[in-house]
Image (cartoon, rainbow, N blue to C red):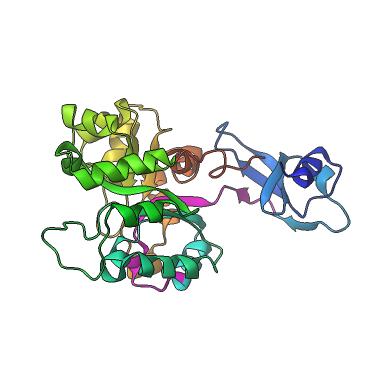
Amino acid sequence: MNLKLLKVAKGEVPADLVVTNGRIVNVYSGEIYEGGVAVCEDTIAAIGDVAYCVGPETKVIDAGGRYLTPGFIDGHIHPESTSLSIRNFASSLLQRGTTVIMADLHEIGVVSGLEGIEAILDEAAMTHLKIGFVVPSHVPFSPDLETSGGFFNTEIIRKALARPDAVGLSECVGPYILMEYPDLIESMHMAREQGKSLQGHLPDMTGPAMSACLAAGVTTCHEAFSEECVYERLRNGCNLMMREGSAARNMPLLLKTVLENKLDTSNVSIVTDDLDATDLYKDGHLDASVRTALSLGTDFVTAIQMVTRNAARAFGMETKLGGLAP
């Protein structure tokens, strides 16, 4: 337990940082109301009326009535798709409100294996962008059809999953699961043993095929293309990751299905998957996705939830990320 954090929350010790005069977008209660945020070191100690947390040494920022939202979370992205260095990539996202990404660095792995991926992650650690490493389940993606500079076997995946920044196993391919592909099944078992999530790649999976993948432990899917896919995922407790990136823009159709049928949105998130640098420069990142969601009729707080709390929930990290709360 962080005793300083406890004392700040009680008002016994001043906060390090207090943001005042804001409009809190509360992704837990669904409200927007006046208030502020008090921070101790790197953790929120209190929200709402936080005047009691201000001391002589507290840095105070006047929000000037602006909205205070959690930092945006992209739950599935391949940063290499931008062709930017990780530092420039991080800077570009932070300027647009994204503070966390769940990154599958598969393409780096194809070129230079885990060593190359770890070099990127080491450089990323020097930025203010928080990266959850989602370990590629296959490098290369089709081992029997590709020749690559890097190759992942189960021992390399075990080593990667043991990293403290590893949050899950990425791209657990539906057909491979159904075929009980030995290396993938073993990797999925290792991930679950270590408490890491299994991120699905389940194109057109429905019925028994979908049930089998979820029974194997998969909790998300970013490969939804139709109204049927929406129902199959949400009815089975699978996080529906709606893609709105450069390579695929599935969100308009998927979100229309959710809204018109008044489906619960708490298990719906927005991801980019692949993002071209030109699109990032012209349109933005998840900020652009939120604007698109609003234009399609989504309630403002609901749109914010899709890129914050819901994305954190997809990784079982909703008590650490995705909201403004102690």
Please say whether residue 69 is one of the residues in the magenta stretch: yes
Q: Residue at x 31, y 42 (%)?
A: 188
Residue furthest to the right in view is: 56
Which of the 4 image quarters holds residue 282? bottom left
Q: Position of residue 293 (x, y in %)?
A: 39, 45
Residue at image position (78%, 43%) is: 3
Q: Nearer the viewer, residue 114 or 132?
A: 114
Q: Quadrant of the N terminus?
A: top right
Report the residue that reaches farthest toward the front.
Answer: 155
Q: In the picture shown, does residue 287 fall above or below 215?
A: below
Judged left or right of residue 251, residue 294 is right
Kindly tell me whether residue 297 is visible in this rendering: no
Residue 299 is situated, as x and y percent measured from the top left of the image, at 46, 37
Q: Position of residue 266 (x, y in %)?
A: 43, 32
Expressed as whole percent of the image width and height from the top left, the position of residue 181 reads 18, 43
Is residue 73 visible to the viewer in this orientation of the structure?
yes
Q: What residue is drawn where x is 81% and y is 56%?
A: 58
Residue range corresponding to the magenta coloring: 64-86
Residue with the most extreme left position: 145
Residue 252 in magenta? no
Q: Which quarter of the image is occupied by the C terminus?
A: top right
How many marks on residues?
0
**Residue nearest the viewer, comparing 97 with 74:** 74
Vertically, is 33 above or below 81?
A: above
Q: Is residue 84 left or right of residue 251?
A: right
On screen, residue 198 above or below 28: below
For residue 48, side relative to residue 319 (left or right): right
Q: Residue at x 63, y 51 (%)?
A: 66
